[in-house]
Amino acid sequence: MPVMPASSRSGGVRPARRGASVLAALALTALTSAALVPATASAAEPYVVGGEETSVADHSYAVYLVDDDGRQFCGGTLTSSREVVTAAHCADALPADELGVVAGRQDTRTDRGIEAGVRDVWVAPSYQDPMSGGDIAVLSLDRAVPYRTAQVADDSDAAKYRAGTEATVLGWGRTAESGERSNTLRSAEVPVVAADTCSEAYDEYDPETMVCAGYPEGGTDACQGDSGGPLMVGDTLIGVVSWGDGCARPGKPGVYTRVSTFEPQLGGQSVDT
Ligand code: ARG
């Protein structure tokens, strides 16, 4: 997949100071970054970015998406034995018959755990591109996966979105902005960021459909390859890794799809046969 062309969302209505760098960051999505030869990996940011290795056995709802060649390119969250919530921009990257889901595999270099095929893909109807919101999709798997699933945040979970709530992001993505993918599952704690603060960071931020998380000083974040993966509060999926300006930059929190907004649409997307 080619780098998402910046022209595809230029539109000309945006002031110049917006967009450019965020677009550059967004351009490095999914398969694109899988194919990229990592540039100089910064030794200063050793993890997810700023996190630590974590056990997939303890977070078995955390899964990853692979292409035809078995290459990891996004994350996902098991929300039932046959359903994975991911980002629309991940689900869109390939035809369903070329998508695979790997569950229960700590290290991408091994063949442990389970690989499932994707029978059906539902993408939020409002989705156009990550920065316009609706970056969420549900993959229906071709087999049941016997792992612990995550709860999907709904209206009753408003408290989990309060600024300062400690959330956990998980993934196999880059461990620094221009670093390499992790071979192993990593996690990091990131506080939920107030809507006002996130609006200041990004003109594109929409409090209805997105939630931001990160520290004002940066240093800890999701990064390329983590897209589609979970932002958890306890056992509840509150966000889906979607976009950001670079990774772990000061004043530039990670932006996640606000799961509770889409929860009413997520159920009943697949027939469990
Ligand atoms: N779009 C990226 C992906 O496809 C995820 C970017 C998340 N960025 C961030 N700074 N939190 O993997």
Image (cartoon, grey):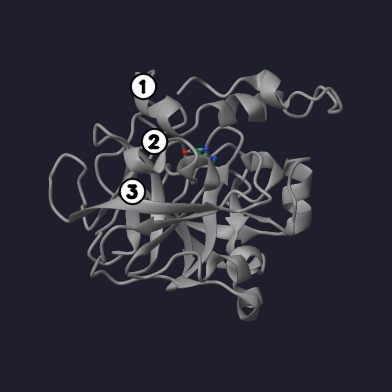
Q: Amino acid at mark 3?
A: Tyr
Asked if 92 appears above or below 123 in the picture, the reply is above
**Can the viewer see residue 69 in this picture?**
yes
Q: Which mark is residue 38?
A: 1
How far, Cα to Cα, is label 2 from label 1? 9 Å
The image shows residue 225 at horizontal and vertical percentages of 41, 38
Q: Are marks 2 and 1 in contact (CB under 8 Å)?
A: yes
Q: Is mark 2 within 8 Å of ligand 1?
A: yes
User: Which image quarter: residue 54?
Assistant: bottom left
Q: Which mark is residue 174?
A: 2
Question: Does 153 sit left or right of 69 as displayed?
Answer: right
Q: Residue furthest bottom?
A: 156
Asked if 159 appears above or below 251 in the picture, the reply is below
Q: Secondary structure at mark 3?
A: strand
How far, Cα to Cα, is label 3 from label 1? 20 Å
Q: Which label's residue is closer to the chain start, 3 or 1?
A: 1
Q: Are marks 3 and 2 in contact (CB under 8 Å)?
A: no
Judge by depth and name the residue closer to the eye, 204 or 45. Answer: 204
Question: Does 123 sit left or right of 53 as displayed?
Answer: right
Q: Amino acid at mark 2?
A: Arg
How far, Cα to Cα, is label 3 from label 2? 14 Å
Q: Residue furthest left?
A: 111
Q: Which residue is mark 3?
A: 64
Q: Name the front one of labels 3 and 2.
A: 3
Q: Residues within 10 Å of mark 2 (few under 14, many from 20)?
A: many
Q: Amino acid at mark 1?
A: Pro
The image shows residue 127 at horizontal and vertical percentages of 65, 46
